[in-house]
Amino acid sequence: MRLFTPILLLAGILAGCGPAAEPAPPPTASTSYDDLLALHTDWRAFQPPVIVDGVPDYSLAAMAEQHRALAGYQARLATIDPSGWPVNQQVDYHIVRAEMNGLDFDHRMLRPWENNPAFYTMLFPSPTDVPAREGPVVHGAIELSTYTFPLAPADAEVVAGRVQTIAPLLDQARAHLTGDQRDLWVAGIRTMAGQAGDLDALAERAAGTPLEGDARAAAEATRAFVTWLEAEASAKTGASGVGVENYDWFLKNVMLVPYTWADQVAMMKRELARAHAALKLEEHRNHLLPELEPIEDAADYDRNLNAAVTEYMAFLEEQDVVTIKPYMDAALRARIGTYSPPVNGRREFFGEANYRDGVVMRTHGYHWFDLARMVEEPHESPIRREPLLYNIFVSRAEGMATGMEEMMMHAGLFDSRPRARELIYVLLAQRAARALGDLYMHANTFTMDEAIQYASEWTPRGWLPTDGQTVWFEQHLYLQQPMYGTSYLVGKIQIEELIARMARQQGDSFTLKGFMDAVNEAGMIPMALIAWELTGDDEAVAGLVAP
């Protein structure tokens, strides 16, 4: 049986099979929302790369043609005047504009097909907790967690077909990867070596089926690609960040965030200091209480984590935090995972928190509510129904999941377990430290190694060691995708600002439940657009929505 997937893979593949057609702008200006919907449909069909012999074409010629044709879609959008529309429809217009700007930024600055070996990763065994896979991702990537094993025949055929494209894709990548960005290149070696191991594991799961042979062949092709990357690495000497000016353009025109690079540096420094100070105050208050002890066995883990879901769902309902829907409990419970013993006496960062208090990370599990809602309650706007491209959803997705941690603490969730409050500030400090790594890497004042070291040093309790998987994965993602590292706290701050704005507007009629339900109903879109839609105040998008 096929499980939930944010994007229908096969539909996405087929959408990219045709030639990149450049639309002719209509002869006269339009004020029709229906014209925007028609353009959105055409745009989404155009955006994927052309497929040649089952493989996405990222050649210099193909990418140049796509960038050239993009101008026609942007010109067509420019003929549509949304100024007289209701705010919710104007929001949709700017979502489409931001997506087109995202493709433009890919061509002008990121060029992942040219600079980023990890872009060619095809297999993702673990689920993502946001609407679409984080960072630049090759078209047609396999989200393995969306399938149930043993695979049904139809699913096995789809997966095998995609696995068979890995070797020819990597052959083409050797010709396409002409960039000089050293950190991205070196980090890509580690990522691609990981794919080889993931393909070996897939072969084991598919033992005795045709997919086993396909997976083993793809693993060998990936190992050969790693060898090639290693041989080329010494020649790569350039910086990998996009620079402050380009980062600012991306924030304003793609992510629709009302803060500059410099603004975010100041915000993250403030959050880092606040987290460390608050942690020390909590530790002082709790110093006579026993410390939280980690879970030590599988039975204890299963019992504690299921109890944590029960406790958290009861709190949300009893305290009128948000309207509870039938799918929410199951969505959260399905993602509690299974017990894993510590390695050399330690776990990865989030495990250190999760194994000490199961409720803490359930608050961040708002992600799973969001994904279930997209399936169970599709948004009425087709433009918001599918995941936004280029991770434009991050200020809402990551901001709300992160914001719920501290918001629920202040709402009283951990009153009976004061030591759990300490974990909230440990999490906050880690988010701020890694965000500064994002900002400094893209300013080219930190290398990726320096960003890893900084995040590790500023994360409390030694829970983010430099040789761990978490810190490496995070800083690599943030180097590939500007603003992803800051989105957790930037989005959280925007949510707090919106609470303040709506409470001021509504006075005594304001409720947390009304706020949360309204944000959920707006969909997985940038927080600035949600603030505009919910308040009607265009100050929330000042400087962001002008064509």
Image (tube, rainbow, N blue to C red):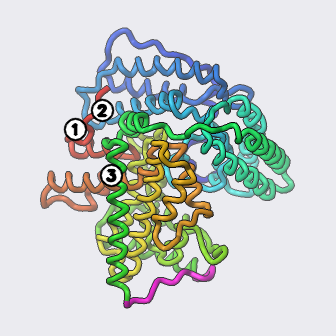
- Asked if marks 1 and 2 touch (Cβ < 8 Å), the reply is yes
Residue 349 vertical placement versus 180 (above, below):
below
Q: Nearer the viewer, residue 418 or 85?
A: 418
In the rendered structure, which segment of residues is drawn in magenta?
Answer: 288-300
In reply to whether residue 449 is colored magenta, the answer given is no
**Which one is closest to the eye, mark 1 or mark 3?**
3
Q: What kind of residue is marked 3? A: Ala
- Which tag, 1 or 3, sits closer to the chain's start? 3
* Residue shown at 60% from the left, 24% from the top: 63
**Which one is closest to the eye, mark 2 or mark 3?**
3
**Is residue 345 left or right of 319 when viewed as pictured?**
right
Q: In this figure, which residue is indicated by the disc labeled 3?
A: 266
Q: What kind of residue is marked 1? A: Asp
Q: Residue 8, how many percent across, how many down? A: 58, 41
Q: Residue 524, how many percent across, how many down? A: 41, 46
CA separation, marks 2 and 3? 24 Å
Q: In this figure, which residue is indicated by the disc labeled 1?
A: 538
Q: In this figure, which residue is indicated by the disc labeled 2?
A: 545
* Residue shown at 86% from the left, 55% from the top: 208
Q: Residue 186, how many percent across, how many down? A: 66, 46
